[in-house]
Image: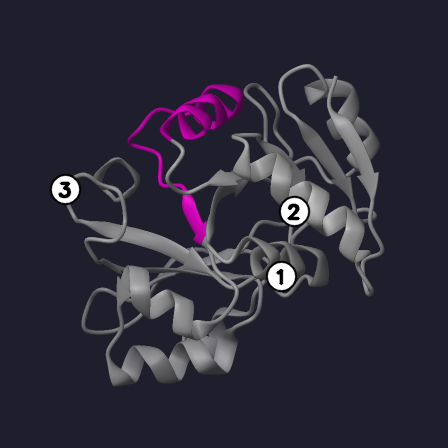
Amino acid sequence: MAQHFQIHPENPQARLIKQAAQIITAGGIVAAPTDSAYALVCRLDDKTAVEKLRRIRGVDDKHHLTLLVRDLSAIAHFARVDNTQYRLLKATMPGPYTVILEATREVPRRLSHPSRKTIGVRVPENHILLALLEELGEPLIGTTLQLPGDDHMLSDPDEVLERLGKQIELVIDGGAGTLEATTVVDLTGPAPELVREGRGDPAAFGL
C-alpha cells in the first residue's frame, strides 16, 4: 500500500520532502500536487519506473511525458533554448505551462518524441514539487494524473490513494488540486503554436 504524506502546501516539511526524495531515488512512483492537476512522477533515468508509470496512465511510448525542472537554468541542460524562447520562458515560468522544445542528448531517447526529437518541459509553481526537485537535485519525468477510462483528471489526494494505493509508492497530499491541465505551447517553430489550452493564459505567448 502506498505511503501517504500530508505536506504543507506553502511551507513543506523538510523531513517529509527528504523521505519523498528517497522513495523516488529508490525507484518509486509518486502522486504529487502541481500548479494544475495532480501528476504521477518518477526519476528521469529510471527506465523501469517510467515504463510502470506509462502502464498506470494507460499510454504507450508515443505519448509525450513531461520533464519537470526546478528553474530555467535546468531547462538549458535538457533542451535547446534560443534568446527569443528564453524571454518567453522567463515571462511565464514558474507557471501552469508546458513548452515543447528541441531536446538535447541529455534526454534519454525513449523519452523524447521519436520523430521530432522534442521534449515537453515545465517549471511548476508549486512549493512542494519545487522543494522535492531541489532535494533531488535532478529533474522528474511526469504525466497528468488521469486514469484509463476516466473523463477527468484526479485532483483529490484521497481518491488518488484509494484508486492507486496498490500501484504506486507514495501519495503526497498537498490539498485539492485543480481539474485543469497545463497549457501546452510548441516553441520549436518560427512562432509559438498552441497545442492545448489549459490553466495558463495563452496570451502570455502572444496567442
Quadrant (top left/top right/bottom left/bottom right) for the N terminus: top right
The residue singled out by tag 1 in the image is 130
Query: For residue 141, which quarter of the picture?
Result: top left
The residue singled out by tag 2 in the image is 37
Q: Residue at x 73, y 34 (%)?
A: 171
Q: Residue at x 71, y 63 (%)?
A: 127
Q: Residues within 10 Å of mark 3 (few under 14, many from 20)?
A: few
Residue 178 showing in the rendered view: no
Q: CA distance from mark 2 to mark 3?
A: 28 Å
Q: Is residue 69 left or right of residue 157?
A: left
Q: Residues within 10 Å of mark 2 (few under 14, many from 20)?
A: many
Residue range (magenta): 47-67
Residue 66 shown in magenta = yes
Q: Is residue 178 left or right of residue 106?
A: right
Residue type, label 1: Leu
Q: Which mark is residue 115?
A: 3
